[in-house]
Amino acid sequence: MQYVFDFTEGSKDQRDLLGGKGANLAEMTSLGLPVPPGFTISTEACRSYLATGREPDGLADEIERHLSGLESGMGKRLGDATDPLLVSVRSGAKFSMPGMMDTVLNVGLTDLSVAGLAAVAGDQRFAWDSYRRLVQMFGKTVLGVDGERFDHALETRKKDRGVDSDVDLTVDDLRDLVAEFKEIVRGESGTNFPQDPRTQLDLAVRAVFESWNTDRARIYRRQERIPDDLGTAVNIVAMVFGNLGPDSGTGVAFTRDPATGEQGVYGDYLPNAQGEDVVAGIRNTLALAELERLDKASYDQLLDIMETLEKHYLDLCDIEFTIERGKLWMLQTRVGKRTAAAAFRIAGQLVDEGLIDEDEALSRVTGAQLAQLMFPQFDPAASRTSIARGMAASPGAAVGKAAFDSATAVEWAQRGDDVILVRRETNPDDLRGMVASRGVLTSRGGKTSHAAVVARGMGRTCVVGVEALRVDPRARAFTTPDGARVTEGDVISIDGGTGEVFLGALPVVPSAVVDALYGRAAAPPSASSGPESEAEAEGESSDVVRREVVSAVLRLMRHADVRRRMEVRANADTGEDARRARDLGAAGIGLCRTEHMFLGARRKIVEHVILARTPEQRDAGLDELRPLQRADFTEILEAMDGQPVTIRLLDPPLHEFLPDLTDLSVRVAVGEATGSPDAEAAALLAEVQRLHEQNPMLGMRGVRLGLVVPGLFELQVRAIAEAAASLLARGLDPQPQIMVPLVAAVQELEAIRDMAEATVAEVAAETGTALRFPIGTMIELPRAAMTAHAIAEAAEFFSFGTNDLTQTTWGFSRDDVEATFFPAYLERGIFGVSPFESIDADGVGRLVSIAAWEGKETRQDLELGVCGEHGGDPDSIHFFESIKLDYVSCSPFRVPVARLEAGRAALVTEGSDSR
Ligand code: ADP
Ligand code: MG
Ligand code: MG
């Protein structure tokens, strides 16, 4: 087993083993780009360490060998007293987790080697600054010292010296700080800062392994659905120094704008600084374009490299670089995160540029991103005056109460308030607050600051670097340039598309993408209207962005429709919903529930049916309901003319249509007490008591209801048949499918089927029309799935009701578990995501695939679909594609997402079939 790999050995395709950072450092090395030499300890080693609590056998030797190689290549020894080699020890997992795990810079500096470094560099200040950083980072990440302690000491020192920035501190200041930091380390951790370079290295490697399991890393993984068992690689990289004076510096860059997808040079640069200074927002950065003025040669080389990377990765890349006394070094690259809008736009652009084909473009956007673009935006027509403007870091329109710390944001969100988290800058400890908030606003930092990167990843609206706002977290307030003061709890609005901040709640309108998906014309260009003209001064107008994003979405939707094998239907119960679903591309109704048709004013009639003493009384009630049902079905069948409409016969327990038990008891008791007994209430009460169930979910509902309450299902079937007959008479093409819920045994279905066929035949005879509808069943009980062979004898279609199937397979009721023990289950990793959100492929999914398979064996043309909420969930859609269902059905608004994901899923299975 080899655990350590030199940068010259790996490639970008080895992210599993080397992590993204390591794989791409290796890739850049083999492209001949200027990467400092180094090596990567594999994720395998990390997994072994995390499983056993100690480094795997042989790892220490391998590190020793690679370190010697590095030392001889560099002509320096790690931590040498006269000319020390220093290294960084960097985390880097398969999937990027920005700022979530640890990195330690300047490893190898000691009381001895700091003098050597100073002598070689000819710069005392630089050497002590580097040492100060090491003690700080090592103390915090390796020895677990509270970082605030160091920050506080540094701030105090700056204040004492009357300087604003750490670059203005003198050698003596820094030397004192190192002594002070070492004291803090000793005091807080009980150990001395280690003076042996190799010990530093080993402890740092171990700390990076362990940083895989910090709270914030776990939260991030859950949020991003990154598996918990991957582990991180560790990269040991020879240090290069951006803090060697004004001709040195460090920066980050994107090959395209990650917020809008616009082509150009985007990034931040900070002269005379090391590593994390840029993202940390400690000093305000320069726009990358400024580098051209400061160091044209490095700037030009950087642009060349960026072009090389885009052509090589065929995608937007982000990079980290450092300039050491005029020499450019590449420290990281990866395919960059981007907003949903940028994802679609860039995919479209790359197709236009001939770099990728439409299949590839489709694989680069996701349903989740499309869903984000379907969110509402601020009404462009509403009058508004922004109080300040920063950088548009992650789009969307967010309105909420200002909260100035993470805990408050979480607390308010839990009680149901919309919150905007306002910070000077965020750090990984703010993660919970960011998750809980509608939007994030910071006064510092650029497009690559922690707030920006994390918010983009989570799809949170985010505005950063609003320098005009003075944020005072202690006073829980900020002040605007014209002196207005916003305190905790005041409502503000932020526009993540323009970077604007507003007082109060701005009105919100539907997105342009939704308009376009509905086939409504996109909003007319508003270049001349007020609010946006300011934005144009900075670059493209937001109209251009919007138009290009909309056209990329439509183009990829078309391609997804070409590619997908599965149909997408919608769950809709009313004509209006049906029309909306159809406009959004649904090819039918996969689930039309009928329970709402028995509520409201009609509930009284249902009561009469249930309370009827004689068949005549009952039939009178049913006769009263029939024309109403017929009208319901006529409306929906008409809206979906020519497309299948799967109508589910009544499913919920009867008592849901009767008054509440307690209310009734009170009514009866009051009547008796006042000497005027209420006979009707008493009768109802008796019935309600009779129908009361301990576990209604598992009680008399679904097909059981149809078998026990005479005439009920018959009424529904008759109404469907009459509606169809009347539509046929009008020359339309109604296509109802009759679906029986909660079947467990084929005998149940057979009984309903006989009744239904007879009823349809009656209506056909009465109306003189030829009527025949498919009759099928939901598969939502394990027994149904396990007897699919037999059930398919009586069913022309199966519709997997994965909500109930999940409940009955796991044996828990959703309403009860989601609020009680689910958080604990998620916390403990019993599942990574709720099985109600994303199908549990191993358990529930297996039942679905067995039933699908066996059903098809009985009946070749058995139609197979899904009507649970999973029908609109991207991961679940991929699963349903893999077991070759015919369609998924989801809520109307999810239909575009399902179309896109069904297309993407087909690409994936096509790819794996041909392999
Ligand atoms: P993260 O994953 O949080 O970005 P990194 O491992 O990339 O952490 O490192 C943090 C910062 O330190 C980055 O700005 C990176 O460019 C810088 N850095 C890492 N290694 C070196 C090195 N060998 N020389 C100079 N700077 C480095
Ligand atoms: Mg990095
Ligand atoms: Mg159900």
Image (cartoon, rainbow, N blue to C red):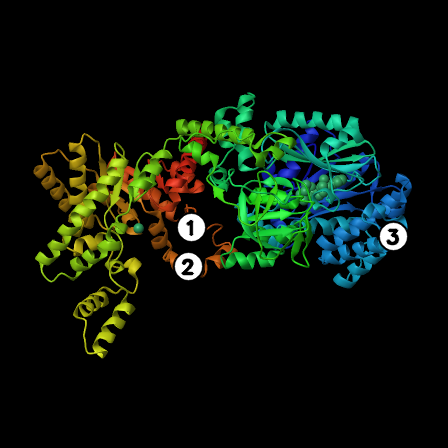
Tell me the residue that label 3 is attached to.
173
**Mark 3 crowdedness (10 Å alpha carbons): few <14, some 14-19, many ≥20:** some
Vertical order, 450 against 543 (above or below): below
- Residue 676 lies, in percent from the top left, at 18, 75
User: Based on the displayed image, in which of its 4 quarters is residue 17 positioned?
Assistant: top right
Q: Residue at x 62, y 50 (%)?
A: 212
Q: Is mark 1 within 8 Å of ligand 3?
A: no
User: Based on the displayed image, in which of its 4 quarters is residue 308 positioned?
Assistant: top right
Q: Is residue 494 left or right of residue 307?
A: left
Tell me the residue that label 1 is attached to.
835
Residue type, numbered disc 1: Pro
**Mark 2 crowdedness (10 Å alpha carbons): few <14, some 14-19, many ≥20:** few
User: Based on the displayed image, in which of its 4 quarters is residue 332 positioned?
Assistant: top right
Q: Cα distance, mark 2 to mark 1?
A: 11 Å
The answer to which of 571 and 34 lies nearer the viewer is 571
Residue 885 visible in the displayed image: no
Tell me the residue that label 2 is attached to.
817
Residue type, numbered disc 2: Val
Secondary structure at badge 3 equals helix
Q: Cα distance, mark 1 to mark 3?
A: 57 Å
Q: Residue at x 48, y 54 (%)?
A: 830
Of label 1 and label 3, which has the lower sequence position? 3
**Mark 1 crowdedness (10 Å alpha carbons): few <14, some 14-19, many ≥20:** some
Q: Residue at x 15, y 51 (%)?
A: 624
Secondary structure at badge 2 equals helix
The answer to which of 615 and 745 lies nearer the viewer is 615
- Residue 398 lies, in percent from the top left, at 54, 46
Secondary structure at badge 1 equals loop
- Residue 87 lies, in percent from the top left, at 77, 42
Residue mark closest to the camera, 1 vs 3: 3
